[in-house]
Structures are given as C-alpha cells and as structure tokens.
C-alpha cells in the first residue's frame, strides 16, 4: 500500500515535469549561467581553475538545488490540489519520501549535464579518471539536499514571501553539505587522489543524510497538521 | 467554533447552513481532517482522528470548491493517481465505470486544463466516489457542478440513505438540498443555533434563526 | 496564573521568584568569575592578557549551545502538547542563544586580531562554525515573522529541532575540512590547562549558563505579565 502510494506520488511529479519541462530545464540553464558568472567573477580567464573545481561545482549545484527545491510543491500549490492529497490516507512519511525522491531525480538529471561541463570549463588537470568517485560524492550530497530540501520547502510552503524564505532557511543548513561535497570532489579531482580524505567527507555526508532523515521523519507529520 | 456537538448516524444526510463567516467551511474542513481542532475530539467512522487520522481518511469523500485534480494530467491519470493513493484493488475497472457514470469516458485522455469548470467538477465527483467513501463531505456542491453533475450528485445522495452512507452538505440554498437531506443544522458565529429533522420543519423558523445570527 | 482583580497586595506572577533567584545567582557568578578571570587566574606565558578573553569566549559558546538545546527540547514539547508556553520558551531560548553566538563571534574576532593580527581567520573552526550557527538561527526569526499563530509556532518548533541538528553538522564539517587542509591552529584547550585556570574556566562556564537561565526566566516572566495585562484589559473593558 505504502509502496503503491510512493510510486504514484513520484510518478505524478515526474509526469508533470515531463509535460511542462519547467523545472529541470530552468535548473540546467541556471547552473550554466552560474558557472559563467563564477568564471568571470574570479577574473582568471586563462588560469588553471582545477584547484577550485570542487568549490565551483558545489556552489553552482547548491544554488541550483535551491531553485529546484523551491518548485517541489509548486504543482500542488498553483493547481490547488494539496487538500486532495491531504484528505487521502497517505502517511506523511510517504509524502516526504516521494518529494525527496523527486528532488533527487531532478538533481541527478541536472548533474548529468553540469558535471561534464564543470570539467570542460574549469579543469585542466586529471579529471575524467575521477568521474566515478565524483558521481558517488554527488549522489550522497544529493540525498542530503533532497532530505533537507523537502523539510524546508514544506516549512516555507505556507509562509508569506516563501520564495525568499526558502533560501534563507535552506542555504545555512546546506553549508556543511557544500563543505563536505566540495572537499570530497577536491580530494579526487584536484590533482593526486587522496582516498582517505574522500572517504572522510563521504562518511560525513552519509551522517548528514541519516540525521536529517531522522529529523524529517520525526517532524514531518507536524508540517501539514493544521 | 465553540460548543459544537454533532452526531451523525450512518445513512443520515445533514445540511449545514449559516451566513458567511459562521464557520460552515471550517467545520467541514475539520471533519475532513484538514484542520486539527484546538480543543475537543473528532471521531470519524468510529476512529478518533487524533489517534488514527489515516484510517478515518480512507473512508472520507471530500468535494471542495476546487476540483482537487491536477490540470496538467489527463482525467484518467488523475483518477489512477488518486486510486493508488487510496489503494483501490480494482482500479482500472472502477475508473472506467466512474468515467462512464460522470460522462467523461470520451475525454479520459485529455488534460483537465482543457475541461470546462463543470466537467472538471464532474471529474472531482468521480475522484470523490473512487474509493467508495462512507462519509461524503460536500462544500456547496451545487454552486460549482453543472446541471449534469448536480443530477448525478442528487442520485448519489438519494442512494446514500439506503446504502448507509452519511453526508454533510454545506449549503447556501437550503431549499435546494432539503429534499435530499434528513436534518438541518444552522451555524451562527461558530455555534449551533438550530439542529432539527428537515421533515416538517417550518421555513419561517429557519429564516428567523438565520436572520438572528446574520451580522 | 491570572492575577485576580480583587487582591489588594502586589500581583504575583508564576515564575517571579525563580527569576529573582536566578538573577541573583547569575549576578554573583558573573561578578566573581570576572574578578577571578581578570585578576586572579595566572597569566598565559605565550599570549598574555588577551588569553583571558578565552574563558568567556568558550563559556559563552557552550552556553549558547545549551540555549539551542533547550530550544530544541521546547520545540519537541510544543509539537507534543501544542501548549504555547513551550513556544515562548523555544523562542526566548533561541533569542538568548543567538545573542550569545554573536558575542562568541565578536570575542573570537577580537582574539584573532590579538593572536594572529587579523580580524577574521577562515582557518579557525570555532569562528567559522559560529558564523554558520548565527546564520541558521537568524533564519529562525525570519521564518517566525512570515507565518501566523498556530502555523508560526508549529513551523518554529520544527525549525528549532532541525536547526539544532544542523549545529553539530556545521561543527563537524568545518573541523573535517580543517583537519585535511590545515593543522588546527588552536584546539579546545581543556586538556592541558593548569588547575587554577581550569577552576576559573568552570566558574566562567557556570556564570554563563546561570546568565542564560536568568535571562530566560526574565523573558518568560515578561511574556506572562504581558499576557496577564492583556487579559486584565479585556476584562476591564467588558466591565
């Protein structure tokens, strides 16, 4: 029953996204613009930015994530169907998981485009060899982003100026993810691989995901409990 | 909302009236488990909502002002989605039946965005009936349904009596729903000011009570 | 709880006595520990007088964590009971914790200037972490100001819980990064402190925690009296 509900919720979000293609396209474009701005912001058009690739990538992805997370209840809100979900016998935990999975899928879809671009734009050193390790890092960081993002977008849903509230709530909580994900990326992409460093950061991301999963499960009932 | 104490028997159909701001819709949203009462208890279909909201929700059918369907999905996709949320075993057959019933079989594969308001609300009617709810909660249904939808709803309410399904109908037009209801409750400023069987009720009394609580 | 209209004597509110007691304890502890830290404790051979700020810097930092912990517990209790007094306690704790955190950043910055000649050092984990913590809890008030009543209290409680979960994560992430990039410049300091320093450190810590409790009691008392006054006004208006 729960699994059927979960699949239905995720499939519905993806169907809506495939029909309108609003969110993912906007996220990808935003990420590309962001990287161009970062490049000019650093003012080093000819320099080797390989050393900063972790930071550049995760600053870009963090802001892109805010954009995507901000859209996560937009279908329910703009199309005024949230009550329809809330009167249905869906455990709030299933709603949480469904939204988190949808955000995770958006992030992965964006990264498939963005990560190779990061390599082309910024990396002169060894990079492609590390792509597998970077993918694992990204997946872990995406889980963190999805869990924290779902909780905070639920909180921002009914506030005034919700589009402003979400980044204010979400970005400070995302700082540890950016630190760890950038560090892990740096460890494998910026020169010689340092696997123990990479492992340390990835374990941290795992811990973050577990902690936020617990907090979300414990509090998500109250988000929609009017 | 203060001191509202109502009991609804199976098969009983209750019309809920009152002036704007009396708390009709709020009471309906509380019954639909969308608002948690600040004090007091709510038992829906034998389940205390504070303890087992999910079980209570499984037996509720809620028809609101908004159709509560996704405009960017097709009629069938919407019903499939809600069918999965309610875990209906015979989903596809049930959906075909209901689409026939509300006269939308021919438009099943069109997105709801292309529907007229009356059609969307008929789809909402199908969504509400999908899981065979035992308590219907209707928020001014006749205001948003078209002629055809209204007749379908009237049939449902007539059948409810013999099926043992209860209904609460928030309404502005008591005369319109009176023949379909057993009992009338008038709310004024969050209190029950009248609660009587509809049969043999004196319209003058209703009007007087109504005016007394109209600000 | 509500003061009666018929009493002749001064109206007493619940918690007034606690506020007075904790206020007194905090005052005494703050005075004693200030004297102790600046006049009695031995001077650090390397860092001199500026090292004395360390006692309060660390004590305030830990007291602010206590405040956030209290806020988290109050948030949990609010969600369980839906009693607005827990919301009061939650908000008051975070307000004081935030004040303390800002003090941590300021004292840390002064210290950085004295020790390393610069106001801000990104390599000092404590400073960076507290900056993040300040950002997390400023957002709490932004959230509060954009919702109403029941929802405001509910969302605040959830955020207080999630915020408290982010605090250790911020601490740890900054330290993980530090340990790889730089040797940590300055470690906690408890382990190899002379006993007299440790005594005054504990004293300063007790003073800061007592200060937090006193401020919390006063804050809650203020809210209670405001509410009581509000109810009195309503009753008087109704005659």
Image (cartoon, coloured by chain):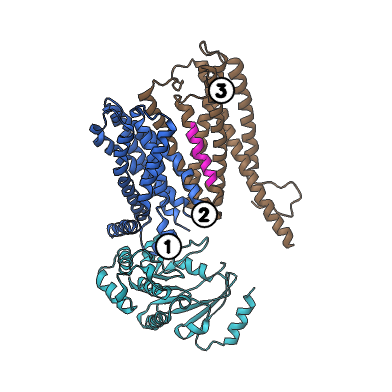
Q: Residues within 10 Å of mark 3 (few under 14, many from 20)?
A: some
Location of the N terminus of chain A (image quadrant): bottom left
Name the residue that disc number 1 marks: A79
Residue B28, position in %: x, y? Answer: 48, 69
CA separation in Å, label 2 and label 3: 40 Å
The answer to whether B12 appears left or right of C96 in the picture is left
Instruction: Name the colour assigned to chain A in the rendering.
Output: blue
Instruction: Report which quarter residue C232 is drawn in.
Output: bottom right
**Mark 2, secondary structure of its residue:** helix
Instruction: Name the colour assigned to chain B in the rendering.
Output: cyan
Q: Are marks 2 and 3 on the same chain?
A: yes
Extreme-right residue of the structure: C8
Magenta stretch bounds: C130-142
Name the residue that disc number 2 marks: C151
Residue A148, position in %: x, y? Answer: 40, 45
**Mark 1, secondary structure of its residue:** loop
Name the residue that disc number 3 marks: C110
Q: Nearer the viewer, residue A68 or C30?
A: A68
The answer to whether C32 appears left or right of A92 in the picture is right
Please tell me which residue is depicted at 36% across the width and 27% down the height of the picture.
Answer: A47
Q: Evaluate if marks 1 and 3 touch, with contact meaning CB atoms under 8 Å apart.
A: no
């Amino acid at each position: 029953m729960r699994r059927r509900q979960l699949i239905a919720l995720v499939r519905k979000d993806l169907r809506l996204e495939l029909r309108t293609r609003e969110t993912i396209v906007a996220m990808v474009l935003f990420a590309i613009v962001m990287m161009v701005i970062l490049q000019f912001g650093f003012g080093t058009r000819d320099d080797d930015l390989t050393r900063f690739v972790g930071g550049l990538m995760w600053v870009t992805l963090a802001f892109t994530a805010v954009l995507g997370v901000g859209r996560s209840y937009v279908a329910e809100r703009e199309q005024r169907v949230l009550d329809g979900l809330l009167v249905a016998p869906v455990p709030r935990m299933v709603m949480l998981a469904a939204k988190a999975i949808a955000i995770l899928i958006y992030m992965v879809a964006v990264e498939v485009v963005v990560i190779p671009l990061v390599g082309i734009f910024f990396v002169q050193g060894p990079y492609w060899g590390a792509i597998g390790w970077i993918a694992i890092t990204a997946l872990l960081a995406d889980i963190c982003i999805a869990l924290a993002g779902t909780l905070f977008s639920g909180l921002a849903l009914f506030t005034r100026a919700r589009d402003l509230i979400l980044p204010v709530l979400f970005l400070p909580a995302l700082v540890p993810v950016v630190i760890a994900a950038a560090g892990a990326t740096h460890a494998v992409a910026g020169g010689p691989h340092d696997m123990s460093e990479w492992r340390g950061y990835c374990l941290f991301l795992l811990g973050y995901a577990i902690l936020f999963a617990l907090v979300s499960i414990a509090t998500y009932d109250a988000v929609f409990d009017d | 909302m203060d001191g509202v104490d109502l009991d609804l028997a199976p098969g009983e159909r209750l019309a809920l009236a009152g002036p704007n701001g009396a708390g009709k819709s709020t009471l309906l949203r509380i019954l639909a488990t969308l608002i948690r009462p600040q004090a007091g208890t709510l038992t829906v279909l034998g389940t205390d909502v504070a303890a087992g909201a999910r079980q209570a929700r499984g037996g509720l059918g809620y028809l609101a002002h908004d159709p509560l369907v996704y405009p960017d999905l097709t009629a069938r996709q919407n019903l499939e989605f809600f069918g999965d949320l309610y875990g209906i075993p015979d989903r596809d057959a049930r959906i075909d039946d209901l689409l026939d019933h509300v006269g939308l079989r021919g438009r099943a594969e069109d997105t709801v965005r292309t529907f007229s308001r009356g059609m969307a609300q008929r789809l909402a009617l199908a969504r509400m009936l999908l899981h065979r709810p035992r308590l219907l909660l209707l928020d001014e249904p006749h205001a948003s349904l078209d002629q055809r939808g209204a007749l379908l709803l009237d049939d449902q309410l007539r059948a409810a009596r013999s099926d043992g399904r209860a209904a609460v109908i928030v309404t502005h037009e008591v005369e319109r729903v009176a023949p379909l209801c057993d009992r009338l409750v008038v709310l004024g400023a969050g209190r029950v000011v009248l609660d009587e069987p509809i049969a043999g009720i004196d319209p003058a009394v209703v009007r007087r009570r109504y005016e007394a609580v109209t600000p | 709880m509500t003061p009666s209209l018929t009493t002749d004597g001064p109206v007493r509110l619940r918690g007034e006595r606690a506020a007075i007691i904790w206020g007194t304890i905090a005052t005494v502890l703050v005075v004693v520990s200030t004297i102790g830290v600046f006049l009695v404790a031995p001077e650090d051979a390397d860092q001199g007088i500026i090292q004395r700020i360390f006692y309060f810097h660390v004590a305030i930092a830990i007291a602010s964590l206590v405040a956030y912990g209290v806020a988290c517990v109050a948030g949990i209790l609010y969600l369980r009971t839906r009693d607005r007094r827990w919301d009061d306690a939650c908000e008051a704790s975070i307000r004081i914790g935030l004040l303390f955190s800002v003090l941590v950043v300021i004292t840390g910055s002064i210290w950085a200037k004295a020790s390393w000649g610069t106001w801000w050092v990104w390599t000092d984990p404590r400073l960076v972490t507290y900056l993040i913590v300040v950002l997390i809890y400023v957002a709490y008030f932004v959230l509060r100001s954009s919702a109403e009543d029941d929802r405001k209290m509910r969302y605040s409680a959830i955020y207080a819980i999630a915020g408290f979960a982010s605090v250790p994560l911020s601490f740890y992430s900054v330290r993980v990064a530090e340990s790889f990039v730089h040797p940590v410049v300055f470690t906690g300091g408890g382990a190899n402190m002379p006993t007299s320093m440790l005594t005054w450190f504990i004293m300063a810590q007790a003073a800061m925690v007592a200060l937090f409790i006193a401020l919390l009691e006063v804050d809650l008392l203020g809210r209670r009296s405001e509410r009581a006054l509000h109810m009195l006004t309503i009753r008087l208006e109704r005659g």
